[in-house]
Amino acid sequence: MSNVVIAIPLFMLMIIVALLPLLIGVYVYRDAKRRGMNAALWTLIAILAPSLIGFIIYLLVRGNYSNLKCPRCAATVTEQYVVCPKCGAKLKPSCPNCSAPVEPDWTVCPKCAQPLPTVQEDIVTPVQPKDKTLWKILAAIIIVPVVLLLVLGLSFSAASGGGSSSLREVSFDEYYADQELPESTKEYVRNWLGEINPRTDHVYALRYTY
Ligand SMILES: [Zn+2]
Ligand SMILES: [Zn+2]
């Protein structure tokens, strides 16, 4: 019974451990591709570097790459884009004279020194898509050690609670010291033990009939 109890979480754990690099690989590939990073290279780094170091480095480096989307057509855009290259939506205020990107609170264009209008119309702010997959991966990374500890705890309690695993080796004379057996029987068993030349990887049984 205790074997079954241990086997089920162990099986689940094996599945999670096997799926985690796959999950991370698929996530990194898609995320890197969306940000215009070298997707194949980053996927290899994230999967092959030990102890998730590659994945952690990827999460740190990817901040330098844009993950913004045009709110109108969902095309990938960066903070520097004045208009969406796909649908032409205005993403950022620009100088009416030289079209350089400007900030909303600037009054003069830093490029051509022309005064800027105070209000610019029809600007849609790029959106950052919500990243649910990352949280799922992080949850799995936390769940794996927890399940591992749980399995270890279960198998430990099963081993110590069962009592059957606490084996102690005793010699024949120690075992039969308190037994009410005729001396001839003890002699017989002693001889049998001497004959079989026991090996540690074998189990021996002696049956004697009255
Ligand atoms: Zn667009
Ligand atoms: Zn200008």
Image (cartoon, rainbow, N blue to C red):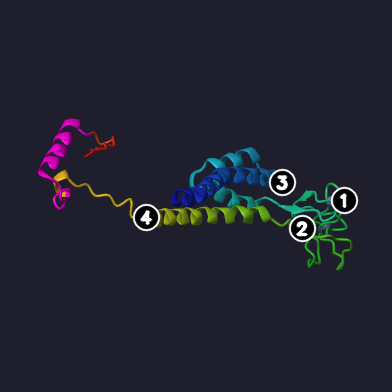
Classify 59 as above or below 42: below
Q: Are marks 2 and 3 in contact (CB under 8 Å)?
A: no
Taking 19 as reference, is 146 left or right?
left
Amino acid at the residue labelled 3:
Arg
Magenta stretch prevailing secondary structure: helix
Q: Mark 2 or mark 1: which comes first in sequence?
A: 1
Q: Which residue is mark 1?
A: 88
Q: Secondary structure at mark 1?
A: loop
Q: Which residue is mark 4?
A: 162
Q: CA distance from mark 2 to mark 3?
A: 14 Å
Q: Residue at x 20, y 31 (%)?
A: 196
The percent position of residue 58, horizontal first and vertical second, equals: 59, 48
Amino acid at the residue labelled 1:
Gly
Q: Mark 2 or mark 3: which comes first in sequence?
A: 3
Q: CA distance from mark 4 to mark 3?
A: 54 Å
Q: Mark 1 or mark 3: which comes first in sequence?
A: 3
Identify which residue, 136 or 158, lies in the foreground: 158
Counting other residues with Cα less than 10 Å from the Cα at mark 4, is it few (<14), some (14-19), or many (20 or more)? few
The percent position of residue 152, horizontal first and vertical second, equals: 43, 53
Task: State the extent of the magenta-drawn residues as a range.
Answer: 175-198
Taking 200 as reference, is 118 left or right?
right
Q: Which residue is mark 3?
A: 34
